[in-house]
Image (tube, rainbow, N blue to C red):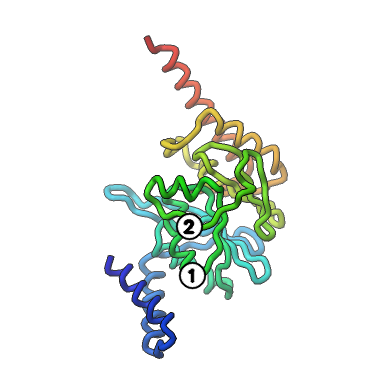
Amino acid sequence: MLKYSLILSVALLSGCGAATTADHAHKDTFLTQIQTDYPVTLSKIADNVWVHTTNYSLPGQAPIPSNGLVVVDGDEVTLVDGAWGELATLSLIETVKSETGKPVTKMIVTHHHADRTAGVDAAEYRGVQIFTHPDTPVLAARAGWPAPNTSVASLKAPQSRTKVGSLEVAYPGPGHAQDNLVVYVPSAKILYGGCAVRGAEVKTLGNVEDANLTAWPTALKWVKATYPEAELVVPGHGKGANLSLIDATLALLAEANAEETDDTDAAP
């Protein structure tokens, strides 16, 4: 809470019209400290495209890596998902600006869970325009997570697609979550599957509390058929690979659905 209060204090100082050199120095020092406390890894995977990875720590558990993309297109810098947390997202925004020399202008939020929405308020405060499924703000607020102020009405129906700058954003239908989106970078043939696609080293489906196990395979098959030219698939957590990540996730879903059928058949 102390750090968050400091952020608000710095924001007020920088916006009151009478900020001094000392105020700016305080702000710069604080942002530098945030980047130290919440480190961001940027891994370049193509011209003007990076994977951003940050870690989130839950009590009693090892840090959980969480991925997203950074895409530069002229003067536009788009984040595909922020970091898992407000301060981590501020660190991400500052790190991206340092790396690219340009401020983040847009952020695509791929579903309503905290690992995707926790930094929304921080991004909006910095003037970043948010794009997401129209159900995401309601679902996030219902779950108690930060809710985006804006969404894209044209992504409401399953198998719908729209453009955000040079990127294509698609809603394949329910899967890991009711509102999970995927993002395609045509210039680099990179598909960001988010949490709808499991990482290369992962052997489970992870958090399925809000999953639709029946609809998820249909959604993934549509994604694979829609973007067959994708050469690299980036998951929300874990290591990327090619379209084999979708096949591996489909195999995990087939196993989970078979077990569910067996349990239903065995019920008295």
Say which amino acid is labelled 1: Arg
Count of all numbered marks drawn on residues in the image: 2
Q: Is residue 264 placed above or below 123 in the rendered structure? A: above
Q: Nearer the viewer, residue 40 or 146?
A: 146
Residue 79 x %, y %: 55, 60
Quarter in which the C terminus is drawn: top left
Q: CA distance from mark 2 to mark 1?
A: 20 Å
Q: Earlier in the sequence, mark 2 or mark 1?
A: 2
Residue extending farthest to the top is: 268
Query: How would you rate the neighbour count of disc 2 (Cα within 10 Å): few for under 14, some for 14-19, many for 20 or more?
Result: many
The residue depicted at 59 percent of the width and 49 percent of the height is 192
Point out the frontmost of discs 2 and 1.
Answer: 1
Q: Is residue 232 left or right of residue 33?
A: right
Is any part of residue 60 visible from this angle? yes
Q: Please say if 12 is above or below 215.
A: below
| Mark 2, secondary structure of its residue | strand
Disc 2 to disc 1: CB gap under 8 Å: no
Residue 11 % position (x, y): 40, 76
The local secondary structure at tag 1 comes to: loop
The residue singled out by tag 1 in the image is: 126
Q: What label sits on residue 185 in the rendered view?
A: none
Which residue type does callout 2 highlight? Thr
Of 29 and 241, nearer the camera is 29
Placement of 37 over or under 150, stated as above or below:
below
Q: Residue furthest bottom?
A: 21
Instruction: Please give the residue where the numbered disc 2 appears in the rendered image.
Output: 53
**Label 1: few (<14), some (14–19) or many (≥20) C-alpha neighbours in 10 Å:** some
Q: Which residue occupies 53% across, 41% down? A: 196
Question: Residue drawn at (52%, 63%), measured in percent from left and top?
Answer: 42
**Picture coordinates of residue 24, whole percent (x, y):** 41, 84
Q: Position of residue 17 (x, y in %)?
A: 44, 86
Task: Name the image quarter holding the N terminus.
Answer: bottom left
